[in-house]
Image (tube, rainbow, N blue to C red):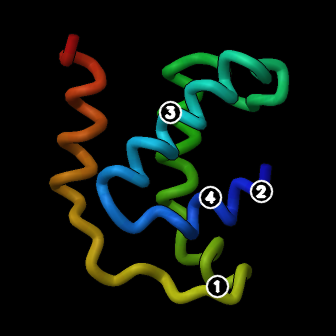
Amino acid sequence: MDWFDKIESVSNKQQFLEFVNLLSADYKKNRDEWENKSIDLFLQAIEGWMEDMEGFYENSGLDTPKNIDWNFLANMLYVGKIYE
């Protein structure tokens, strides 16, 4: 599976949900391939990547997204803590 192709194909809620399900299934099947095997390491990796995301996009020859809804992302991460 080409993860970058999957990421590029996400443009709506349904595709995002499918992507999250693919990640979850991949974690269950290929846990040894994941660098971040705990929630704290996973969140630290997100934080580290976000701090350097401009460099990632620049080095990849891509435009850095300009209209990121930071409040929505914060809510999405938080509800992962409390939603049943």
Residue 8 screen position, x and y as percent: 57, 69
65 horizontally vs 46: left or right: left
As drawn, the label of residue 6 is 4
66 horizontally vs 61: left or right: left
What is the three-letter code of the residue carrying label 1? Glu
Q: Could you tell me how far apart the alpha carbons at marks 2 and 4 are, in whole angstroms?
A: 7 Å
As drawn, the label of residue 33 is none
For the view shown, which residue lies furthest in the top direction?
84
Disc 3: CA contacts within 10 A as few (<14), some (14-19) or many (>=20): few
- Residue labelled with disc 1: 58
Q: Residue at x 69, y 29 (%)?
A: 26
Q: Are marks 3 and 4 in contact (CB under 8 Å)?
A: no
What is the three-letter code of the residue carrying label 4? Lys
Q: Could you tell me how far apart the alpha carbons at marks 3 and 4 are, in whole angstroms?
A: 12 Å
- Residue labelled with disc 2: 2
Q: Residue at x 40, y 51 (%)?
A: 16
Q: Could you tell me how far apart the alpha carbons at marks 3 and 2 are, in whole angstroms?
A: 15 Å
Q: Residue at x 29, y 25 (%)?
A: 80
- SS class, disc 1: helix
62 horizontally vs 18: left or right: right
Quarter of the rendering occupied by the C terminus: top left
* Mark 1 or 4, nearer chain start: 4
